[in-house]
Image (tube, rainbow, N blue to C red):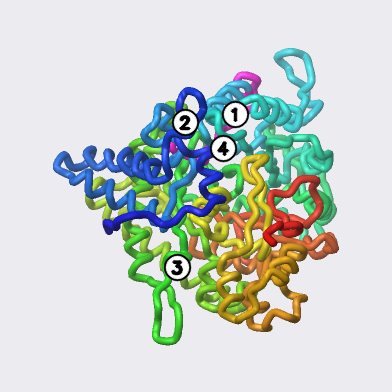
């Protein structure tokens, strides 16, 4: 798979790389080019080949890894790009830390969080094991302050730690819906300055969701004694979650029973939380390294127009799985407990970006039944190829050490990796690759993105410019109109077929957002990062219907965002100055 040269890096990509990824000298000046960054990462990850075969052609493997990344066909998660071949050498993006019901455990987790954030990772926590507010503490004759108060300690610690000098940490906080403090948890982020370094999700159970549908009460359970504390109306609590999400975008929902039905090593424990963006459910102390294939690069000419290049995609998957497995060996783990379970399960999460671009290239509108069907076929192909690649690696290197304790033993596929697929949001990775994010639709035809807290990046989608030129409508007046509006649906000067193809997040009904997430989830081992976008005029009832559809359609979680519901947005469509 060796290729010469590299794909062109856009000005926005170069700005992001210079800010966060490229090596700097002692005075803070960038002293690395994108090509040298890719070579640094490729050389470092190829070294793992010698662990399994002293005669391995490490240079060839490095060349293959380099070509994959420099061609912008695949990129590993950000910590790998930042740290591989450098002093830090911490390569994983996702971590989950346990928080038990003792001060020692809580503050051990705070310390561990600081070390992980310093190294470039994000952390997820379940606070469901902590005793509720005002509960007696017999050892001190005091009373407990509850999970939310301790979350504020984690939030403050995150605030003062800059990740490896490059980015601020991110956290996921989960509380089970049957915890006695659940109402406080649901409401806490309605105050705009609370827990600003946390994403919050309520961990709901099938029992709770069925009680919601039947309009029945459910029990709040003390996490230590397991006794019923009180009963609440499930429908009323669900309504509070809906209204809070409508107002601020938080909390989201995690469907814990759905997640644990895909837990490949249930004998090692139950999964209680995820990484900060929700796509990676993990056991306590587990970490995972992710990577994403740029689907916009997986297209070839066909007899009736562009088509998915399955042969190229298959080759890319096989090499990407090898690269991600090598990351596990090359990683320098921040804690011995993390190293033990990560090496024991060897989870990887290969996903995609550029899906919206791929649909445009194939002429398929995002919000259509053909797009949903295509997504299912695509992800089924990717999962099958990742598992085949993992089986081949297991033949070379052995199955993951915890395989005998997994659901795959004794007669399942003999896999190198306990999981192989994850759909990540790919925020900055998509900027580097010059493609659309994850499986999201285009946010706007013209957008201004805030990256890394203060870097403003403006763009008119290049495929639209290409299509507008082909249709003979490209001019400064057109650019001025879409710069003001973002969407093109009301612009009758643009041909109908282009308006139908270039739909944006807010042009798409929430039902199609959820259905697309469910289509990918059907064939994804871990979970799917996807935002269900709502226009500012949406109602809480529309949010409620989206949550219920996500539950019924097999999603592992759901996050909604109603435009304008927060003071600060990462993506906006208005006032893109290009003319």
| Segment colored magenta | 91-106
Above or below, 290 against 135 in this view is below
Circle 4 or circle 2, nearest the eye: 2
Q: Earlier in the sequence, mark 2 or mark 3?
A: 2
- Binning the other alpha carbons within 10 Å of mark 3 as few (below 14), some (14 to 19) or many (20 upward) gives some
Q: Residue furthest top?
A: 140
Residue marked by disc 3: 380
Q: Are marks 1 and 3 in contact (CB under 8 Å)?
A: no
Can the viewer see residue 217? no
Residue marked by disc 2: 24
Residue 95 falls within the magenta-colored stretch: yes
Circle 2 or circle 1, nearest the eye: 2
Circle 2 or circle 3, nearest the eye: 2
* Residue 180 relative to residue 275: left or right: right
- Binning the other alpha carbons within 10 Å of mark 4 as few (below 14), some (14 to 19) or many (20 upward) gives many
Quadrant containing the C terminus in the rendered view: bottom right
Residue marked by disc 1: 162
Q: Earlier in the sequence, mark 2 or mark 1?
A: 2
* Alpha carbon distance from label 1 to label 4: 12 Å
Q: Secondary structure at mark 4?
A: strand
Above or below, 193 against 236 in this view is above
Q: How many marks?
A: 4
* Residue 567 relative to residue 310: left or right: right
Residue marked by disc 4: 122
């Amino acid at each position: 798979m060796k290729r010469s040269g590299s794909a062109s890096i856009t000005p926005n990509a170069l700005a992001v790389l210079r800010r966060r990824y490229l090596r700097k000298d002692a005075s803070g000046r960038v002293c690395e080019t994108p090509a040298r960054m890719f070579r640094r990462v490729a050389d470092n990850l190829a070294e793992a080949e010698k662990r399994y075969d002293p005669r391995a052609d490490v240079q060839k493997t490095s060349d293959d890894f380099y070509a994959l990344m420099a061609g912008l066909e695949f990129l590993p998660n950000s910590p790998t790009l930042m740290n591989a071949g450098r002093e830090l050498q911490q390569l994983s993006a996702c971590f989950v830390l346990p928080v038990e019901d003792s001060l020692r455990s809580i503050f051990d987790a705070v310390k561990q969080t600081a070390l992980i954030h310093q190294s470039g990772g994000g952390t997820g926590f379940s606070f469901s094991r902590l005793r509720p507010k005002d509960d007696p503490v017999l050892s001190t004759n005091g009373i407990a302050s509850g999970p939310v108060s301790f979350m504020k300690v984690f939030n403050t610690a995150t605030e003062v730690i800059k990740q490896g000098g490059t980015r601020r940490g991110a956290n996921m906080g989960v509380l089970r819906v049957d915890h006695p403090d659940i109402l406080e948890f649901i409401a806490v982020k309605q105050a705009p300055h609370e827990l600003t370094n946390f994403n919050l999700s309520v961990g709901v159970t099938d029992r709770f969701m069925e009680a919601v549908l039947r309009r029945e009460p459910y029990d709040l359970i003390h996490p230590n004694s397991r006794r019923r504390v009180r009963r609440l109306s499930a429908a009323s609590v669900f309504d509070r979650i809906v209204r809070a999400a409508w107002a601020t975008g938080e909390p989201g929902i995690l469907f814990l029973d759905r997640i644990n039905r895909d837990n490949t090593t249930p004998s090692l424990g139950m999964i209680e939380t995820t990484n900060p963006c929700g796509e990676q459910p993990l056991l306590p102390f587990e970490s995972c390294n992710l990577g994403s294939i740029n689907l916009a690069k997986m297209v070839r000419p066909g007899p009736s127009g562009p088509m998915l290049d399955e042969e190229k995609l298959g080759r890319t998957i096989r090499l990407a799985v090898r690269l991600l497995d090598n990351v596990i060996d090359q990683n320098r783990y921040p804690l011995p407990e993390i190293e033990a379970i990560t090496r024991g399960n060897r989870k990887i999460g290969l996903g995609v970006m550029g899906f919206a671009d791929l649909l445009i290239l194939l002429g398929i509108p995002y919000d259509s039944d053909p797009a949903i069907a295509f997504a299912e076929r695509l992800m089924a192909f990717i999962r099958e190829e990742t598992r085949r690649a993992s089986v081949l690696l297991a033949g070379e290197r052995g199955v993951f050490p915890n395989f005998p304790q997994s659901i795959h033993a004794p007669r399942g596929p003999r896999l190198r990796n306990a999981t192989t697929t994850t759909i990540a949001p790919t925020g900055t990775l998509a900027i580097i690759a010059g493609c659309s994010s994850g499986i999201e639709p285009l946010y706007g035809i013209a957008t201004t993105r805030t990256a890394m807290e203060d870097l403003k990046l403006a763009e008119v989608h290049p495929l639209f410019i290409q299509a507008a030129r082909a249709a003979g409508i490209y001019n400064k007046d057109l650019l001025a109109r879409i710069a003001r509006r973002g969407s093109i649906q009301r612009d009758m000067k643009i041909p109908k077929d282009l308006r139908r193809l270039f739909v944006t997040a807010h042009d798409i009904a929430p039902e199609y957002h959820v259905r697309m997430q469910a289509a990918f989830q059907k064939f994804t081992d871990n979970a799917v990062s996807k935002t269900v976008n709502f226009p500012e005029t949406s109602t809480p009832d529309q949010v409620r219907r989206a949550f219920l559809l996500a539950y019924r359609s097999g999603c592992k979680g759901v996050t909604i965002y109603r435009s304008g519901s927060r003071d600060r947005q990462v993506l906006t469509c208005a006032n893109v100055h290009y003319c």
